[in-house]
Image (cartoon, helix red, strand yellow):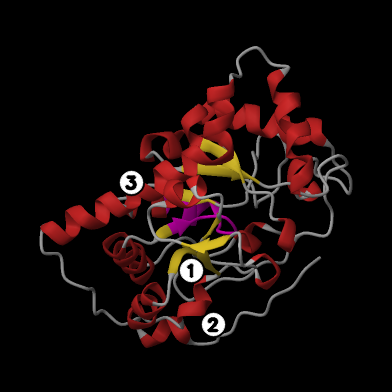
Amino acid sequence: MAAHQGLSGFCDINITAVFKKGKIASLIAIEGGHGISNSLGTLRMMYELGVRYLTLTHTCDTPWATSSVIETKGGSTSHPGLSDFGKKVVQEMNRLGMMVDLSHVSTQTMRDTLAATQAPIIFSHSSARALCDNPRNVPDDVLRQVKHNRGIVMVSFYADHVSCADRANVTHVAKHINHIREIAGIDHVGIGADFDGINKTPVGLEDVSKYPALLAELLRDPRWTVADLRKLVGENIIRVFSEVERVRDDLMTKGVEPIEEEIHPEYLRGKTNCTYFFD
């Protein structure tokens, strides 16, 4: 960011206005619910500091939500899904206007969250499980729920997520985008490359300068139009963010108060730390 101060802009809702000025709109996020230390007060503080989406888990469980690690051999088997306190976290995020990110969560947490939220959710960097059976990816039944929820699945470029192997290419990524489009619809798919968090990129998609190659690959399918590509590369996520803030405004109009509930101490035993690992 320091190297591009003339291009960068920090924004809340009016991302389009920032784009029209030729600047980059940057959203601040927390990847992993452990970052709020099981505190709704801390969640509110993070929102005030500019955080606009929270990934409920990362590479390990929180005391109130299970991660995709639970579905990996040797993973945790305790407290599957979203707990009652986890539902309060989601409800408070709805009230604040903070996007709920379900990348990294377990399948049960996906389903529980979609049942609990009043606002659209996002998967910021996940792909289609039907094409690559990795627990980090989204199964078809959840893709259908995402359509009903008016959320978005933003396709990860990580080779393990798109080819289930050490190497992937542009065609692999395009297939995931097309599958999500087929199941959830064109309004519910985006790009979530995760370049800052992966060490294996698809051949031909090594950085953002290669995006035209992906768009050209998609245009080989006659279903795709330029208007569809605009939705894929930005309009869909902007729409989701706007709808999340519309839910916030509706809840504010109804006088919904901040949630002050604390997590029950029994859920904290042995589950207060989350150590990042990268394989």
Q: List x then y, in percent, for residue 197.
A: 72, 62
Q: List x then y, in percent, for residue 198.
A: 77, 59
Question: Secondary structure under badge 1?
Answer: loop
For the residue marked with disc 1, what is the amino acid?
Answer: His
User: Spatial distance from mark 2 to mark 3, Cα to Cα?
Assistant: 33 Å
143 or 10, which lies in front? 10
**Disc 2 vs disc 3: Cβ atoms closer than 8 Å?**
no
**Disc 2 vs disc 1: Cβ atoms closer than 8 Å?**
yes
Query: Is residue 268 at all visible to an observer of this figure?
Result: yes
The stretch drawn in magenta includes residue 139: no
Pointer 2 or 3: first along the chain: 3
For the residue marked with disc 3, what is the amino acid?
Answer: Glu
User: Spatial distance from mark 1 to mark 3, Cα to Cα?
Assistant: 31 Å
Residue positioned 51% across, 67% down in the render: 28
Q: Which residue, given by chain and number where applicable, does mark 3 sit on?
A: 243
Quadrant of the image occupied by residue 225: top right
Q: Which residue, given by chain and number where applicable, does mark 1 sit on?
A: 79
Q: Write down the region rendered in magenta.
A: 100-112
